[in-house]
Amino acid sequence: MQWHSLGEFFAMGGYAVYVWGSFGAAVAALVAEAVLLRARRRKALRVAAMPQDLMP
């Protein structure tokens, strides 16, 4: 497929909502995964630093 302008590229032949929506959903999932991993790592480090008698 060839595009003759930037507008045609972003329109994706009428499928822009699906194409860009899927890219947006994928990026949102990757960002959420990174944020959740960081939170889990911080919690694990806090638990690891606790004295043994205070561990849950």
Image (spheres, rainbow, N blue to C red):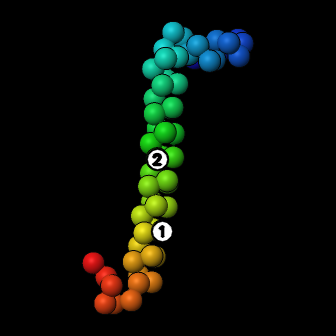
| Crowd around label 2: few <14 · some 14–19 · many ≥20 (10 Å) | few
Which quadrant would the C terminus be assigned to in this image? bottom left
| x 33%, y 90%: residue | 52
Disc sitting over residue 22 in the figure: none
- Image quarter in which the N terminus is found: top right
Asked if the residue under mark 2 is in contact with the one under mark 1, i.e. CB atoms within 8 Å, the reply is no
| Residue that numbered label 2 is attached to | 32
* Viewer-proximal residue among 45 and 56: 56
Q: Residue furthest bottom?
A: 52
Q: Give residue 16's position: percent from left, percent from top.
A: 52, 17
Res 41 quadrant in image: bottom left
Near-viewer residue (4 or 56): 56
Q: Residue at x 31, y 82 (%)?
A: 55
The vertical placement of 3 against 31, above or below, is: above
Which percent across, then down, holds residue 38? 49, 61
Which residue is labeled 1 in the image? 42
Q: Secondary structure at mark 1?
A: helix
**Helix, strand or loop under label 2:** helix
Amino acid type of the residue tagged 1 in the rendering: Arg
Q: Which three-letter amino acid code belongs to the residue tagged 2?
A: Ala
Looking at marks 1 and 2 on the same chain, the residue that comes earlier in the sequence is marked by: 2
Residue 26 in percent (x, y) is at 46, 38
> Is residue 10 visible to the viewer in this orientation of the structure?
yes
Report the side of 43 relative to 10 (left or right). Answer: left
Could you give the CA–CA distance between mark 1 and mark 2, rounded to whole angstroms? Answer: 15 Å
Task: Name the residue rendered at 58%, 13% in the picture.
Answer: 11
Q: Position of residue 7 (x, y in %)?
A: 68, 12
Query: Which residue extends farthest right?
Result: 5
